[in-house]
Image (cartoon, grey):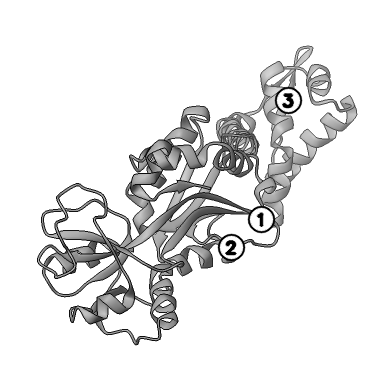
Amino acid sequence: MDRRTRDVLALLPVLVTVAEVGQVTTAAAVLGLPQPTVSRRLARLGDLLGTPVVERRGRGIALTPTGEALLPDAQEGLARLERAVERVARARREGHGTVSLSFQTLLGETVVPALIRAFREVHPHARFELAQGSRQKALDDLTSGRATVALVASPPQVGGGSATVLYDEPLVVAVHRQHPLAGAAAANSPVQRSVSVTELVSSGHDELIVLKAGYGLRGRVEEIWADAGIPLRIAFEAEDVHTARGLVGAGLGVAVLPAFAASHDVVPVGLQHPRARRTIGAVVRDPYRDPTVAAFAAFVHDRGAGVALASLGRAVQGDEATGIRRR
């Protein structure tokens, strides 16, 4: 944009106001400017365009053909600018902005939709930008500023931010129904028995299906096996829990996964280890820089655990059976 165009833009409010009221004196009052200043600005606008934009007509003032030609675009441009300013102002008001949320893929099936729905019941105009992937990706999105909220396992404390734990859940060994350790587990039943890493290895069917590096669950499995002093025997690396469970169902190995209900082919078996649990929570970066993000942070802190547990179909009173517990 050249300098002349910028100068013309700065004078358009005067032209539009004069056209609307038809008098320089009244336009000056509306604009909060001295009358001579309004007259000088109209004259300056004519100089920039090479021809006057207003002319005397009786006791009032009227637009010249040049002014008439310029007026519609001037009105439209100023109206669009006014709407843009209002959008920015509205976004700064609580509940009218955007929450950029990055989360681990498994949480996108139930927990994330439930949190968004419950929050929008209170703030129906809030918008969400979503990204998903591994735990590391979600945290990288938070660090880089691509996200303002991360939903992850083992939520870390971040400088200038806040972390809220939603719930704890056990990790179990997913085995094929015909696996020697499956026992008499029935479909849709809770975990039937519990085994140690040593027992799993002794069964002779301990080839593991794990998630790829960067996923929090992969790191936890490596820690548990290292603590037991047993090397991992990796059969496949998957990018999500559903694929890992499907590979187990095909009889291609076993997997350590978050607790789940038994299906036709895959049975959960408890894992005996103090670290065979994971904590799910939300990390919010600089929550008070944006009112809507601050409102979401407060919502997660106050109601997030209840909403998340309800979405998983695990009421608090059912914790003893499922192993899921509120923090």
64 relative position to 73: left or right: right
Q: Nearer the viewer, residue 326 or 284?
A: 326
Residue 284 x/y as whole percent: 59, 53
Q: Residue at x 58, y 61 (%)?
A: 145
Name the amino acid type tagged 2: Pro
Residue lying farthest top? 59
Disc ID at residue 156 = 2
- Residue 50 shows up from this direction: no
Mark nearer the N terminus (1 vs 3): 3
Q: Please determine whether, in this image, residue 91 is positioned above or below residue 234.
A: above
Q: Amino acid at mark 3?
A: Glu
Give the mark nearer the N terminus: 1 vs 2: 2
Asked whether the beta carbons under mark 1 and mark 2 sit within 8 Å of each other, the answer is no
Dot 1 falls on a residue whose secondary structure is strand
Q: How crowded is the residue under tag 2: few (<14 C-alpha within 10 Å), some, or many (20+)?
A: some
Give the quadrant of residue 14.
Answer: top right
The foreground one among 270 and 119 is 270
At numbered mark 2, what does the secondary structure look like: helix, strand or loop? loop
- Which residue position holds label 1? 161
Q: Which is closer to the viewer, label 1 or label 3? A: 1
Disc ID at residue 55: 3
**Residue 175, percent from left and from top:** 19, 66
For the point 83% across and 30% down, which residue is it? 39
Q: CA distance from mark 1 to mark 2?
A: 10 Å
Rendered position, 45 above or below 182? above
Tell me the number on the disc at residue 307: none
Q: CA distance from mark 3 to mark 2?
A: 68 Å
The amino acid on which the numbered mark 1 sits, given as a three-letter code, is: Gly
> Which one is in front in this view, the residue at disc 3 or the one at disc 2?
2
Q: Between 7 and 231, which is closer to the camera in this rendering?
A: 231
Q: Residues within 10 Å of mark 3 (few under 14, many from 20)?
A: few
Distance from label 1 to label 3 (Cα)?
60 Å
